[in-house]
Image (cartoon, rainbow, N blue to C red):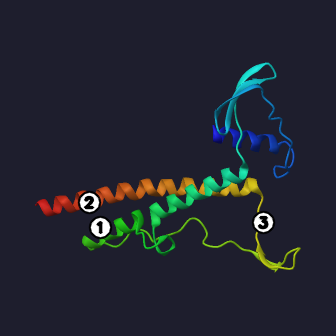
Amino acid sequence: MRKILILSLALSACASNPNKAEKLDTQVELAAPVATDQVIGVKDGNMIVQKKVLMSEELRRLQNETYEVEAKVYGGHRYFDNRGLYGVLEDCMMTKRLPMPEKREYVVPEAETTKLGLDENNHLVGVSEEFLKDRIERFATYRKVLRDRAQEYESKIKLCEMDRVVRNGQ
């Protein structure tokens, strides 16, 4: 449902400037809550289920989910010495004295470019800006790439461990 909301927001915005905030009609007659962000009711005579999310919460959820998947896949110094699936595969390959098939490549950039300067209250600040639509698309892409890599590493770990069991059993 969330994807549908984001997609419909993106498609409605594509009609003009995709980064321009448009006024949305979120009024639902006879609204009854289903969940904290969902109601059922009537709109234009049609029975509907409406899910309305704050984009700040949606972006936070997407970013957190992406960082969690990256931690699962790569671990590393960015994630408190968690070795991740990459580290498990590396350990397995080392016991077989084989080189790793690929190097560790983080998907999410470690730091964003910021402009440094003074804000309206004369405080030193760092500011980075990005269109919301672009950031959501970027993190959705990161998440997809990381999920694919997680599946790939899980398969390689199983193969490596099965090979080790077979060799030890002979």
Image quadrant in which the N terminus is located: top right
Which residue is under mark 1? 92
- Looking at the image, do the residues carrying marks 2 and 1 touch, with CB atoms under 8 Å apart? yes
> Relative to 93, does residue 14 appear above or below in the rendering?
above
Q: Which residue occupies 51% across, 69% down?
A: 105
Q: Which mark is residue 170?
A: none
Q: Amino acid at mark 2?
A: Glu
Q: Label 1 crowding class (10 Å Cα cut-off): few <14, some 14-19, many 20+?
A: many
2 or 1: tag closer to the N-terminus: 1
Q: Residue at x 78, y 77 (%)?
A: 125
On the image, the x and y values in percent for residue 51 come to 69, 36
Q: Is residue 104 above or below residue 30?
A: below
**3 and 1 marks in contact (CB < 8 Å):** no
Crowding near pointer 2: few (<14 within 10 Å), some, many (20+)? some
Residue 120 quadrant: bottom right
Label 3 to label 1: alpha-carbon separation: 42 Å
Q: Quadrant of residue 16?
A: top right
Q: Residue at x 38, y 56 (%)?
A: 154
- The residue that label 2 is drawn on is 161
Look at the numbered disc 1 and give the secondary structure of its residue. helix
Packing grade of label 3 (10 A; few <14, some 14-19, many >=20) is few
Three-letter amino acid code at disc 1?
Cys
Disc number lying in front (3 or 1): 3
